[in-house]
Image (tube, rainbow, N blue to C red):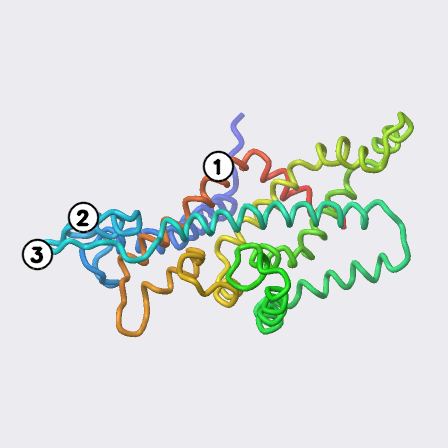
Amino acid sequence: MAIVPPKSRRWQTLLAHAFLISLCAAVVFPFLVVLSVSLRPGNFASGSLIPSSISLEHWRYVLGLPYVRPDGTIIEPDLPVLRWLWNSVKVALWSGVVTLALSTTAAYALARLRFAGRKHLLTGLMLMQMFPAVLALVALYAIFDRLGTAFPAIGLNTHWALVLAYSGGIAGHVWTLKGYYDTLPQEIEEAARVDGASTWQTFRRVLLPMALPILVVVFLLAFIGAIIEYPVASVLLTQQDLLTLAVGSKLFVHEHSFRWGDFAAAALLSGLPITVVFLLAQRWMISGLAAGGVKG
């Protein structure tokens, strides 16, 4: 006998589907608008969603290729967009690696070791992540300005300064990793120690392989956070060839020139690295995100 759901349940299902479709449309619509602006001839932000004519002049510009306008004028790109994209990817990759190295070891110490002040340290980390990095811009500029006099490689207008600045915001990642470590059985690590493994060998060969999903998630969050970050990068980097794409894109829109088409193409270009990383890491993302919040 077929089971027919009550009418109230059917309406709930229809409303749920309508809400999800509306949510997807609200998320996709801004992307379609940006894509439309990048394909319109000229630099106009307003217009129909479907361009009357398709032009690749903005994409040729951000890719560093000269193009010819309808009046015959040859336009040579004057801004190094691809270099900015490479700078963003490089800084994001190193930030992800350094953040992962620091947060995994710190979370292991807080999850497995017992020492004086451990609970106070956890509380302090929670309080630290409540304050945005924008509040520390003056301090960051002063610190790296002073460091640059002694160690030019990590001073102002260096990518290593930006990597170190981003790596300082690991409090949230430490809490995420600690919650995941707490879900892993300690008996496996104790068995490894009985077999003669040291604490470092247990951490590297036993715990880290089991925590691979959450490690991928932490790297992904650090990568995305670094590649889209603007305030800190705009303060520490001022030379044009060292800018990240988030900071360099501001040069398309200033007081006397609004190059919306070029800006839209650069914005879409900046999403390619994030998309590639998402595709590579998607098999670990769901399990890592779900398990990270099971136990704190």
Q: CA distance from mark 3 to mark 1?
A: 42 Å
Near mark 1 (Cα within 10 A), the count class, few <14, some 14-19 or many ≥20, is few
- Secondary element under disc 3, as helix, strand or loop, is loop
Q: On the picture, is 197 further left or further right than 93?
A: right
Residue 235 place in picture, x, y as percent: 51, 68
Viewer-side residue, 194 vs 34: 194
The residue under label 1 is 279
Question: Which numbered disc flags the more N-terminal residue, 2 or 1?
Answer: 2
Q: Nearer the viewer, mark 3 or mark 1?
A: 3
Relative to residue 87, is residue 131 depicted above or below? below
Q: Is residue 103 left or right of residue 135?
A: right
The label number, if any, that marks residue 54 in the structure image: 2
Q: Nearer the viewer, residue 73 or 24?
A: 73
Say what amino acid the circle numbered 3 marks. Answer: Asp
Instruction: Classify mark 2: helix, strand or loop.
Output: loop
Residue 93 image position (x, y, % from top left)? 54, 46
Q: Hey, which quadrant is residue 30 in on the image?
A: bottom left
- At which x and y percent is residue 32? 32, 51
User: Mark 3 sits on what residue?
Assistant: 71
Q: Amino acid at mark 2?
A: Ile
Residue at the (81%, 48%) spot, across then down? 109
Specify which label sits upstream in the sequence, 3 or 1: 3
Crowding at mark 3 (Cα within 10 Å: few <14, some 14-19, many 20+): few
Three-letter amino acid code of the residue under disc 1:
Leu
Q: Is residue 151 depicted above or below 102 in this figure?
A: below
Q: Could you give the CA–CA distance between mark 3 and mark 2, rounded to whole angstroms?
A: 17 Å
